[in-house]
Image (spheres, rainbow, N blue to C red):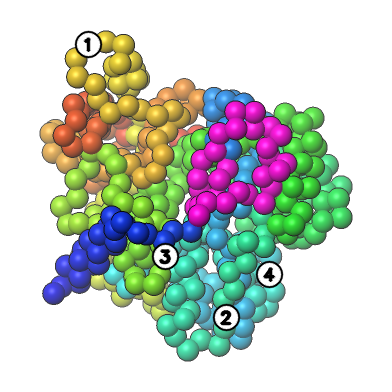
Amino acid sequence: MGTADTQRSMYDAVLRLRDAPFITRRPAYFSPAAAAQDASNSAGSFGEFAQTLLPLEYTNWVEESAAHVNTCYLGDWSSLHKVVVRGRQALDFLAWLGMRDLSRFEHGQIKHHVQLDENGWVASEGILCRLAEEEFLYTAGSGDWLVWQLSQGGWDAEAEDVSPERFIFGVQGPASLATLEKLTGDSLRDISFSRSRTARVGGVPVRVLRTGISGELGYEIHGPAEQANEVWAATAETGSRFGIRRLGLRSQPVQHIEAGIATNGLDYLPAAILTPGAPTQFRRGRPGGSYVPENGVTDYFRKPGELGWGFRKGTPGREFLGRDALAADEARGEPRRTLVGLRWNTADVAGVLTAALGEGDLPDPMELPRGRGPVFDQVLAGGRPVGVSTGRTVSVSLRSTISLCVIDESCAAPGTDVVVLWGSPGTPQREIRATVAALPFKPDRRRTDVGAL
C-alpha cells in the first residue's frame, strides 16, 4: 500500500471511530478568566475553541471585529496549547522540528515555528519564544505534534504541557501600547516586533510579547492562570479610557483573513492528524463547503509555499523534518499554487444572504461575520477548477466579503476574475463572482515604530 493510500486508510479509521456509539472526548471547560468575562457577557452565549468555552460576543460582532483597526481589543487566547521545551538539546530538537533557521535566536525573541511532516506538509505551526538559554515556549492550536515527535527520538530535552497553568490575552490595535503601558506602569517601547520581556500587572508577573496576528500594532500578555480574572478585569478597566473592546469568539478569526494569515484547522488541515497518538484537536469530521477532494484528506493539507511560508532563496541545506520533500518539490517546480486574497462580489453575496426572503430553492446559509469550523470552497476560472477558498468573512473595516485562496499561479495576478462555488454538494449551489487581491488586504502595521508614537 502506498503512502497516500495508507494515510487515507488511517483517516477513514479516524472517522469511523468518531461515528462509534461511545466516544471518549475531553469535556468543554471555561477560560481561567471566565468570572471576569461573565460580567460583560450579557447574552450568556458561548462558543467552543479547543474545548474552551468563550463568550461569542460582548456587544456585537460588527463593533468587535473592527476594534483592532479603530482602537484596540482585549481577546482571550488561553485555549492555545502552551508547551515548554527545556534541556541541553532543546534548541537542536526545535531546529530540526521546524523549517525556520534558529541559529540566531536571542533571549525573549519570538519566531514563527512551522513544523512539517516527512512529506513536507504543514503538521503544526505557532510561535516559539526563547525564555532562557535552554528553555523555550511553543504556543499553537495544538502542541501534540511537538510532544509526540520529541518522544520518538533520543533528544536530551523534555517537553511539559503547561496549558492549564497559563493564560494568553491578546491586546491588538493602535491603542494597544497606550493601554498596556498604563496597565503595567512601565514603558514598553523597548519591545520591538517579535520580541518579549517580563513586566507586572498589579503585582502579577507577566510576559508581554509584541505579536501581529491582527496585522496591526499588537501584543500578547502571558501570565499565571490563578490571576487570569484579575489581569483581564484590570486590562479592560485600563483600556476603557482608550476605547478598548472585548473581543468575542465570533469575531476572533476575522483579523486573520484581513492580514492574510492562514489558520491551522480552519484554512488547512494539519498533516499531524494522520499520526497515531499525535494531535486529536482537529479530528472533528469532514470540512464543509463545495470543494470535493480527489485524493482524500491529503487534499486539505498544504505545503508551506502554498501558505506564504516558503523560502525566498530556495530550500536551505540544513537538516529539518520535511526538508528532503521540499527539495524534491522545488526540483519539480512545485508547488504550483500560491496564497492570494479574494474579494467576493457584493451583489452575489447579498443574493445568498437574502435568499430566504425570495422565491426558489434555498442555498446554504452564510453565517456572519463568518462560518464556524473549516470550510473549503471550489474556485473556478473559465469553468475549470483553479483553487480552493477558505475563511470567507465579512470585513467591516474593508466593507467587503473576503477570503483566502490557494490558487494556480496562472490565476494569481491581482484583478483576475474567478468564481467561487457556494454551497455543499447536493444543495442548490450558487456561483459567486470574485476578484483576486494581493495580501494582506490592508496595510501591514505590525512593525509600527512605537518610538514615534
Please give the residue where the numbered disc 1 appears in the rendered image.
359
2 or 4: mark nearer the eye: 2
4 or 1: mark nearer the eye: 1
- Please tell me whether mark 2 sits on a helix, a strand or a loop: strand
Q: Quadrant of the C terminus?
A: top right
Comes first in the chain, label 4 or label 1: 4
Near mark 3 (Cα within 10 A), the count class, few <14, some 14-19 or many ≥20, is many
The percent coordinates of residue 251 (x first, y second) are 52, 35
Q: Which mark is residue 279?
A: 3
Q: Quadrant of the N terminus?
A: bottom left
| Most foreground residue, 405 or 427 | 427
Please give the residue where the numbered disc 4 appears in the rendered image.
131
Comes first in the chain, label 2 or label 4: 4
Residue 182 left/right relative to 309: right
**Where, by quadrant of the figure, is residue 240 drawn?**
top right
Kindly identify the amino acid type of the residue bearing the numbered disc 4: Leu
Please give the residue where the numbered disc 2 appears in the rendered image.
158
The percent coordinates of residue 284 (x first, y second) are 36, 52
- Please tell me whether mark 4 sits on a helix, a strand or a loop: strand
- Is 32 colored magenta in this rendering? yes
Residue 414 left/right relative to 177: left
Q: Which mark is residue 368?
A: none
Distance of mark 2 from mark 1, alpha carbons? Answer: 62 Å
